[in-house]
Image (spheres, rainbow, N blue to C red):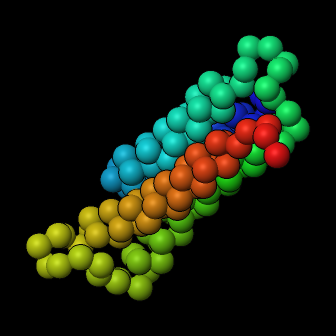
Amino acid sequence: MVAADSLAVAGCTLGAGYGAAASGSAISAFMSIPIAMFGLIMSVIIIGAIPAGQTGYCAKVGYAHFNAGLATGGCGLAGGLTIVGMAQLLRMHKIKCFPKQVPAEYQAPVFSGLLGCGFALFGLIVGLVMSGANCSA
């Protein structure tokens, strides 16, 4: 199912691109790289799970792959938006997230990047669970 892997790649790439471009920080841009990689990982898993012939691939597996791609892409997009939103919120309110040893200008991008990657990782895990469906009852 080509739409499933393209949803994963497109959503994660859009999220990572937006998170890198709109955050205004090289640290946040670097933290958005794993978000794009999660979409690629899910795409490879979905493509690898499709059998060569038409046997062994039923509607149940097709819907599972579609939803796996949708979950991974959607969470990747949410992760990229989180990087931008959290970084701006923490900067605006001057909230410190780490001990004093970490400079204040690095705290917002690192925290928001970790949170965004966490959202995307959650989507990858959910996608991996969904992509394990089979045609048996």
Q: Quadrant of residue 75?
A: bottom right
In the depicted view, which residue is nearer to us: 135 or 37? 135
- Residue sitting nearer the eye, 73 or 28: 73
Counting the numbered discs, the total is 0
Residue shown at the point (55%, 49%) measured from the top left: 124
From where the camera sits, is residue 86 visible?
A: yes
For residue 110, side relative to residue 52 (left or right): left
Q: Is residue 106 above or below residue 131?
A: below
* 65 left or right of 60 in image: left
Q: Outermost residue, right direction?
A: 59
**Relative image position of residue 103 (x, y in whole percent):** 18, 70
Give residue 110's position: percent from left, percent from top: 33, 62
* On screen, residue 123 above or below 92: above
Q: Is residue 30 left or right of residue 85?
A: left
Residue 11 x, y percent position in the rendering: 66, 46
Q: Quadrant of residue 114?
A: bottom left
Residue 115, x across and y down, in percent:
44, 65
Image quarter of the N terminus = top right
Residue at (54, 52) in percent of width and height? 125
Q: Nearer the viewer, residue 91 or 69?
A: 69
The one of 30 and 78 positioned closer to us in this rendering: 78
State the residue at coordinates (68%, 53%): 71
- Residue farthest front in this picture: 137
| Residue at image location 72% in from the left, 34% down from the top | 6
- Looking at the image, the residue that sits furthest to the top is 52
Residue 21 in view here: no
